[in-house]
Amino acid sequence: MTSALNDLLRATSRSFYLTLRILPRAVRPQIGLAYLLARTADTIADTDAVPLAERLAALREFRAAVLGESSAATPQASADFAAQQASAAERELLEKPPEALAALAKLSSTDQQLVRDVLATIISGQELDLQRFAGAQPSGKIVALATDAELDDYTYRVAGCVGEFWTKLCRAHLFPHAPLDEAQLLADAVRFGQGLQLVNVLRDMPADLANGRCYLPLARLTGVGLEPGTLLAPANEAKFLPLYRSYLDVTEQHLQVGWRYTNALPYAQFRVRLACAWPILIGIKTIQKLRRANVAALTQRVKVSRAEVRGIIAKSALASPFPLAWRSLVAPRSAGSTRARV
């Protein structure tokens, strides 16, 4: 990946950039490039100032370019979309597709296919998300997902598939001959990714509601006498918090599976293990904070501080050479051998 793309990666994701830097060089360019392409698609999808039909058209065009089905370098995104970005980094992101696509073309055919497969799935999730919430209105009409199956599908498309991509890439380049249970590793990788996305969903719920989106399924809300428009009303706290915490339980189970995944990796792959451990540890810390929060605190966007993140990174790095200390980083809970559902 070029220095310009590397600088752009640093500017658009400080937290992921830390994870990327610890990874071995053999997989760093492919994962970094996949992130930049996914972030480009996400920025297109999130540009609310552009009409929905144009965003969907731009996503289709961008997907065709990523899959090698078109030579277009997303002129819509470069022109109309870039001008709508408040962030200088995101404006530059939408002006860089030609360079990112050129970097994709330089990867091996196997790595190209892995990147293209994961981007196709991610973009399909972004398109479906836009279509599902087409009737949502900021500070107005709130549209909710219908069922837990829709939530499960969403978290797979935008994050669970990333776990598969990460695993296949690392397996091919770093430990192709390690005796691992391939099917279990990939299944755990999916739940790992879904858990990270559920942390985002539950942490960002107040902001999503303000934008007219509710990722907690309507079937579950109505089952306890709630509706999206009054979900965070103080009068509904006694109904809402038990349901909310049940989703925190599922999220934590997914991250426990992510920890199992991390410890299944060859012990010599300490860089990959650290890159997996950091988001798990930050996610678990976030869950702990969310579990203690009442409705008023949730509306203030609970998050892990930078000082806490630095502490997590330092503690895990120091523990990595010592198996007992390493395993104690995550308190054991029953993660289960099957996909956890609410």
Image (cartoon, grey):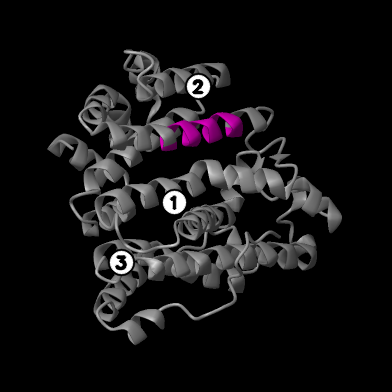
Name above or below for residue 180 compared with residue 201: below
C-alpha gap between disc 3 and disc 2: 37 Å
Q: Are marks 3 and 2 in contact (CB under 8 Å)?
A: no
In-front residue for pair 126/306 = 126
Q: Which residue is mark 3?
A: 274
Mark 3 lies on a secondary structure that is helix
Q: Which residue is mark 2?
A: 55
Q: Which residue is mark 1?
A: 163
- Please, what is the three-letter code of the amino acid marked with disc 1? Gly
Residue 120 shows which numbered tag?
none
Q: Nearer the viewer, mark 2 or mark 1?
A: 1
Name above or below for residue 320 compared with residue 197: below
Mark 2 lies on a secondary structure that is helix
Q: Are marks 2 and 1 in contact (CB under 8 Å)?
A: no
**Mark 1 crowdedness (10 Å alpha carbons): few <14, some 14-19, many ≥20:** many
Q: Main secondary structure of the magenta part?
A: helix
The residue depicted at 38 percent of the width and 30 percent of the height is 85
- Please, what is the three-letter code of the amino acid marked with disc 3? Leu
Highlighted magenta segment, given as a residue range = 118-129
